[in-house]
Amino acid sequence: MSLSNVDVLFQPFKLKSLELKNRIVMAPMTRTFAAEGIPGETNAAYYRRRAEGDVGLILSEGTVIDRPGSRNHPGIPFFHGEAALAGWKTVIDTVHAAGGKMGPQVWHTGSTVIAGLDWAQPEPIESPSGLLAPGKPHGIAMTEEMIADTIAAYARSAADAKRLGFDTVELHGAHGYLIDEFFWSGTNERTDAWGGSTIKERSRFGVEVVKAVREAVGPDFPVILRLSQWKQQDYTTRLANTPDEMADWLVPLVEAGTDILHCSQRRFWEPEFADVDGAEGLNFAGWAKKLTGAATISVGSVGLSSDFMGAFKGENSQRSDISQLLHRMEREEFDLIAVGRALIADPQWVTKIRAQDEAGLKNFDATTLGELV
């Protein structure tokens, strides 16, 4: 690495009211350490350490909206209710005191389950069509009333994020959770206005969530939307097989009020449409930026050599060559880069990258998930 190359990661970024000192984002990574759904001092200290380590923007672990079945693990924090919101107020005040910027990621886990977990998930377990995956029933299909209440719950959480003093909010619309279950034909078999044979038709729920959130937070508060082609139910599935299909999916979401598209792929260096622009072509975030004009965050195994799911199966992960990232940042393929597991293992990852202290970087392995380092 050379200083001139690394410097591309440390350029400031500004969008609406959000001003960041560098281009590095802490990716939202589920930690399940919020007892009874309420973040405490341990959680606040965990995020404070990343702020002290000069992360440009911290995105919280997934934190759920006010719906009965919105989380699939008892350690996932709420983003509703007096006690949980008071806990998040402590988190953001702590991060700001350390010079950091932060947004909560708000989500609904839909019909997804965690295998082997001995916990009774609150019901109803709701999804577009009562499916966990194609041909796999789980829970119930949402009624019109459920859909309306869920959209309103997203908007309330976003408004609370702004009220508490967060710098942005991210909506989780990826990885097979609720919003993504509407996008995916494999879990959305509805024949009403919330379904359809095309990705543009199935995007309606996501569009309405974004519209409601935008109305709740006003025009200047940045809204981020996380998206993925792959699902935890099926790593190989794709929502958009061509740039035209991707435009049909993403453009309405940006027009509805999304400011930044957070484009999750398992390996950030892989081209999204290699048949169009070759093996060195744009990745998911690159195509999203090209097609919509919105700012984008790329993410996927940054600083690691094994892919996303391998680490959660207990496989050790070594750092990958960062030169691929620097090359894509230098050509302005995307605006920000999110780092997940590397920052879970090492709160000082950013400062070590800037100092080119490769020897000092800590490797991630699955045991790191057992505590808040």
Image (cartoon, rainbow, N blue to C red):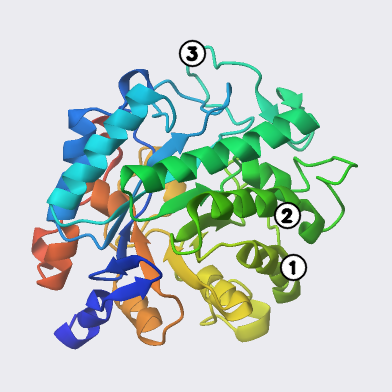
Residue 203 numbered mark, or none = 2
Marks 1/2: CA distance? 9 Å
Q: Amino acid at mark 2?
A: Ser
Q: Are marks 1 and 2 in contact (CB under 8 Å)?
A: yes
Question: Residue at horizontal 38%, vertical 58%?
Answer: 301
333 vs 359, nearest the viewer: 333
Question: Residue at horizontal 33%, vertical 49%?
Answer: 166
Q: Earlier in the sequence, mark 3 or mark 1?
A: 3
Label 3 Cα crowd, 10 Å radius (few <14 / some 14-19 / many 20+): few
x and y percentages locating residue 228 in the rendered image: 57, 56
Q: Which of the two discs, 3 and 2, sits closer to the camera?
A: 2
Marks 3/1: CA distance? 39 Å
x and y percentages locating residue 316 in the rendered image: 30, 46
Q: Quadrant of the N terminus?
A: bottom left
297 vs 175, nearest the viewer: 297
| Residue corresponding to mark 1 | 248
Label 2 Cα crowd, 10 Å radius (few <14 / some 14-19 / many 20+): many
Label 2 sits on a secondary structure element that is: loop
Position above or below: 15 against 46: below
| Residue corresponding to mark 3 | 119
Task: Look at the image and tell me whether residue 136 can be seen.
Answer: yes
Residue 134 numbered mark, or none = none
Label 1 Cα crowd, 10 Å radius (few <14 / some 14-19 / many 20+): some
Q: Which of the two discs, 3 and 1, sits closer to the camera?
A: 1
Q: Quadrant of the C terminus?
A: top left
Marks 3/2: CA distance? 32 Å
x and y percentages locating residue 279 in the rendered image: 55, 80
Q: Amino acid at mark 3?
A: Trp
Q: Earlier in the sequence, mark 3 or mark 2?
A: 3
Task: Look at the image and tell me whether residue 362 can be seen.
Answer: no
Position above or below: 78 against 284: above
